[in-house]
Image (cartoon, coloured by chain):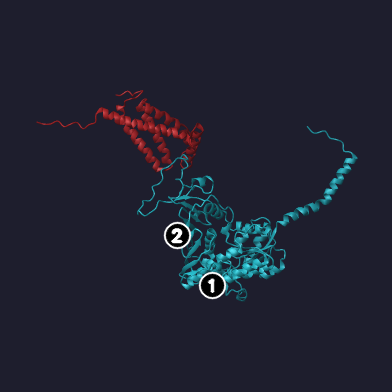
Chain colours: A red, B cyan
Amino acid sequence: MSETPASTSPSRCEYSAAFLLLRLFLGLRTFLAGLEKFESKGTYSFANYYANMGRMASGITGASFLPLWATKNFAHSIGYLLLVLGAALLLGLKTRATLVLTGLVYVGLSFGLMAVQESEGVAWLGIHVIMIAGALVLVRHDRFALWPTKHD
Amino acid sequence: MSAPSTPLTRRDFLANSAKLGAFVAAAPYIARGADAAAKTDQLNVALIGCGEQGAVLLNAALKIPNIRFKAICDIWPYRRTYGERLLKKFGHDAKPYEDYREVLSSHPELDAVIIATPDFKHSEHTVAALKAGKHVYCEKLMSNTVEGARAMVLAARETKKLLQLGHQRRSNPRYLHARDKIVRDAKLLGRVTNISGQWHRAVTDDFGFPVGQGIAEAKLNQYGFANMHEFRNWRWFKRYAGGPMSDLGAHQIDVYNWMLGANPRLCLASGGVDYYKTHEWYDNAIAVFEYPTQEGIVRATYEVLTTTSAGGGYHEYFMGDLGALKISENPKYTKLYREARAPEWDEFAKKGIIASPLSGEGAPAPVKPWEKQGVKKLAAPSNATVDVRETAALSAWEIPVTLDKAIHQPHLENFFDAVRNGTPLNCPGESAFATAVTILKINESIAAQKALTFAPGDFTA
């Protein structure tokens, strides 16, 4: 008489929990990364944002081949993008599309750091991209979403 | 719109003409009066000795207002011409002399004399200048003999003229801030227990001289030199100077005495002519001192090495039970350290007595141009403790005072201020005498190969 081995594959519930953790982490990380761009010496303002981003754009341009118009446009939009995408991840708004867009933002940031040969930063952002790629694999298990993605 | 003009009457015209005439007649006297007022502040100065150090002092003095060089003296025409040309370039009509006695006898208008001749001539030149009624700024070391140094102090006392010695760190604002604010007022070092100091310098070639510019041996002999090689390299020969301890160590050991407000009671030293073949004086020497202070004994070491620049350049390092001060004329060797057990120093930073380092040791990690400023970064992991007896690392701080002038300029300014306004000298003869006694004892100890003691009376001329 043969014995049926106990199943070792995770249940749907476990996948859902794993994805929720990823979504919350990435949502918080992305939202706060956007928020900190408005901060300077403990205060938050739009003036701080444009000062911080102006410095970042000119710093990248000064140390790379990237033109100032490109770095400036990217820098001036990145904070708002991160805030919107981070909030969307936390709330669960069209999570699959949000993850793809967030991944693209991180790839864009990595590109800037690759241009200035900032290897540590690239590795750091690479971890984010890997986590987003993993999240996309698990996105079908998305739960507790305000505006769920339609699954196949 | 222009103001309506009033007709000029004959009476007005005559009155105004009379006023104008009176002003024109008085103008030369008014101008002369103003000139005289400016001249009262002007000091007439001569430089005796225009070698390497003389040129340094000359360049520093030329930056000080209302100093007029009237004479320049050197036995070597080559250097004398250099000094004369430099002074002419800056608008000084200084007469050149070979013999210092002619300077003193031909220029009654001189207020002060700067002496930068070899050490063995300091006493003769200084005493003569003081007795001629001039104030004197003389390079260190005061003299290569205690007797010579004593004669200088006695001459200054007798003539009631000022005598400043060239231990210029005493007028350096960073040194003054360190001593007065950090060590004495704020007592950030706690009880000072140890001092170390050093001047490490790489091997250098002997000085030569341009072809055809040598001085005839008879003339050199007349002024006390054996030959041209010894004339150019007098610092290395015993009949002219005190060697590296006197040339380099004198500045730093003077700071030991000055910072502690004390003189040593014991000296033990070792040294030798280990490397150079053409010198008489020790090329490497190490000295140990014991300083009795009101707070207890301070043990000090000092080493002068002229065969290697390894080991951190030149500095004086005062170590106490709460903190340490590493100070040098070169700001890059200067740092302040707080012991982990000492109270926090933030309040002193707020008062501007000390500062957080902006770069180098103890400074926050540098921010790249594209990074946001002011973000707290995790501190780099400190080196692991390998022995339980190790104490926690010291925190590094900076002295927020820098000198933005030539290093000798503030000391010369102090001298000229003393001549003009009676400002106290930062290094008067009496005080420099104590330093000379301290330094000359090192060479004595090396020769005797034993520890030598000082009696308190040794430091008084």
Please determine whether, in this image, residue B203 is positioned above or below residue A74.
below
Local SS, label 2? loop
In what quadrant of the picture does the N terminus of chain B appear?
top right
Quadrant of the rendered image containing residue B420: bottom right
Q: Residue furthest left?
A: A1
Can residue B74 be seen in this snapshot? Answer: no
Indicate which disc residue B396 carries: none
Mark closest to the chain's N terminus, 2 or 1: 1
Quadrant of the rendered image containing residue A147: top left
Location of residue A94 in the rendering, given as x and y in whole percent from the top left corner: 36, 25
Local SS, label 1? loop
Residue occupied by mark 1: B238
**Is label 2 on the same chain as label 1?**
yes
Location of residue B194 in the rendering, given as x and y in whole percent from the top left corner: 46, 59
The three-letter code of the residue at mark 2 reads: Gly
Residue at the (81%, 51%) spot, across then down = B27
Classify mark 1: residues with Cα within 10 Å, few (<14), some (14-19) or many (20+).
some
The numbered mark 2 sits on a residue in which chain?
Answer: B
Please determine whether, in this image, residue B286 is positioned above or below residue B374.
below
Residue occupied by mark 2: B311
Location of residue B454 in the rendering, given as x and y in whole percent from the top left corner: 52, 68
The three-letter code of the residue at mark 1 reads: Lys
Q: Is there a contact, CB below 8 Å, between mark 2 and mark 1?
A: no
Classify mark 2: residues with Cα within 10 Å, few (<14), some (14-19) or many (20+).
few
Location of residue A115 in the rendering, given as x and y in whole percent from the top left corner: 43, 41
For residue B14, side relative to residue B455 (left or right): right
In what quadrant of the picture does the C terminus of chain B appear?
bottom right
Can residue A25 be seen in this snapshot? Answer: yes
Quadrant of the rendered image containing residue A80: top left
Q: CA distance from mark 2 to mark 1?
A: 28 Å
Q: Nearer the viewer, residue B417 or B219?
A: B417
